[in-house]
Amino acid sequence: MTDVEPWQPRVVAFCCNWCAYAGADLAGVSRRQYSPSVRIVRVMCSSRIDAGLILQCFEKGADGVMVLGCHPGDCHYISGNQREEMRVQEVWELLDLLGIGRERLVLKWISAAEGELFGSTVDSFVTLLQSKGPVGRVTDGP
Amino acid sequence: MDRDDIFRKFHAEACIGCGRCTYACVAAQRYDGFSPRTVAERGLSGRGGEKVTQLWSCTSCGACTQVCNVGVDFPQLIRGLRSLARRDEVPMAAHHGVLTAVGRLTSSPTLRPRSANWVTPDLQTDPHSHTMLFVGCVPYFDVALRYIRDDLLDIPRAAVRLLNAMGVRPRLDPSERCCGHDAYWAGDDALFERLARENWQTARDAGVEEIVTFCPECASVWRDLYPQVIGDTGIRVRTMAEVLAEAIAVGKLELVAGEDVVTYHDPCRLSKGAGIVDQPRKVLRSLSELREMPRSGLLSACCGTSGWVDCDHTAKRVQVERLQEAAATGSEVLVTACPKCLVHLSCADRHHASELSSRVRIEDICVLTARRLHREPVSSTKE
């Protein structure tokens, strides 16, 4: 068969309610096309995402995880995004140890006005994952 | 196995309700709602032993069975009930479930973990050696539990250094997987068997004849549990405590004795699990003066929590009590032979320091021993 669809990675994007989710919304209302591989999960603050949740995503079949929050200083809860940065640094180390690789986890600050940045971040991450292929895993997610 | 089979298989029907287990049990000390006897009684009266509250707080330390008059195998009974209970309820994970996730993720056959990144140039390893040092999850602890202790990687390094001093250059598995200890005791048989087969295949393909571990849990898994899945592995398994005691006895290890006073906390898998009580004490006596705590040896206290589940302030209370017991002996150092005990006791020491009247330093037996290695003066001509 020649018309086999290319492999599509599964990406979970955790977006904070106040900035990144609004940014994703802006990308939508401005009709900015972005990769359908991404599944957006709205959280109140990026710091809600602990190391265990990120590892669980990979366990359940994600090929990449994005944590998107407010720019430093813009956090609705004052310093949540700084805390999240510390957590993500820890997960980067764990992903290297596990052989998954830190490049499969992206942390980025996206404001409510940056719809274009949201779209381009998603697209470039999905392109990267397409070149890397799936993560080896036991259970395949839905 | 259904519930009745589990109760029969592990002799719960023999329970006479004397309550000795309750006095020995660390989980009963933490929660009023739990005791090994309650589990047996509820099961026998048909009220569902797996529905006991705090079923996950059992640390499977084995103190209950140690004191039981009629030989009920409580840890295995609870493990069996957990395998039933986990269909409806998952335990409350500690440390955000990171270490449980590491166990599950490393069971993937296509994943190649890279956890041997702690080897420093002074450590001699040999990829063709028949002796393998099984490192376990300490490299992951070093990331996830760094806020408790930032020197955890000293343990594997010290183990290699000590083996080198005995003339052994161990092999390291560059993509080692979780040993599956926690999965086994949480009643997750499928995951445990997967990990057992993966690890066994790696060791067999590499021609490993002997496995040395500094973690008693890894040792118990390799020695007692993998044979249940695979059959005879043909691999000799020893803990560092045994290796060190033997090397000291035959004079293969030159150590410098110190003036300090230490006390020793027996890890469950090493003492109650494998009966290894004298060997670590022999090692410590050759280094320092050893003072015993009231609860030691086969009747040692548990460090409070296990399997990275169900840790809370009641577990900290148990640990603070143990630290006070250690300080009361007048020792400067509390030595243990299990990285998990080390982490748990260090956590209580760090976060509950205000409750401690006097503090002890908490050290691993390998790290302490490696620090006392007799070193020849360094000369520039030596390789």
Image (cartoon, coloured by chain):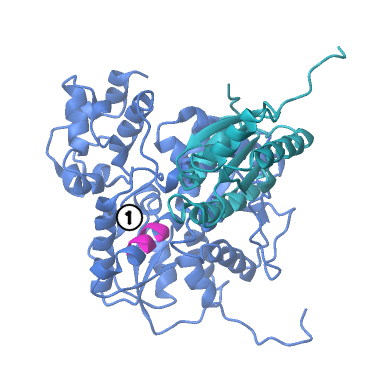
Chain colours: A cyan, B blue
Question: At which x and y percent is residue B373?
Answer: 55, 77
Which quarter of the rendering shows the N terminus of chain B? Answer: top left
- The residue nearer to you, when weighing B49 against B68, is B49
The residue that mark 1 highlights is: B303
Q: Is the magenta stretch mostly helix, strand or loop?
A: helix
Residue occupying image coordinates x 21% and y 30%: B40
Question: At which x and y percent is residue A23?
Answer: 59, 39
In the figure, is residue A122 to the left or right of B256?
right
In the figure, is residue B77 to the left or right of A133?
left
Q: Does the magenta stretch include residue B345?
A: yes
Is residue A127 in view from this perspective?
yes
Against B298, residue B167 (above or below) is: below
For label 1, the SS is loop
Q: Can you tell which quarter of the image residue B43 is in?
A: top left
Question: At which x and y percent is residue B73?
Answer: 29, 35
**What is the magenta range?**
B342-348
Which amino acid is tagged 1?
Answer: Cys
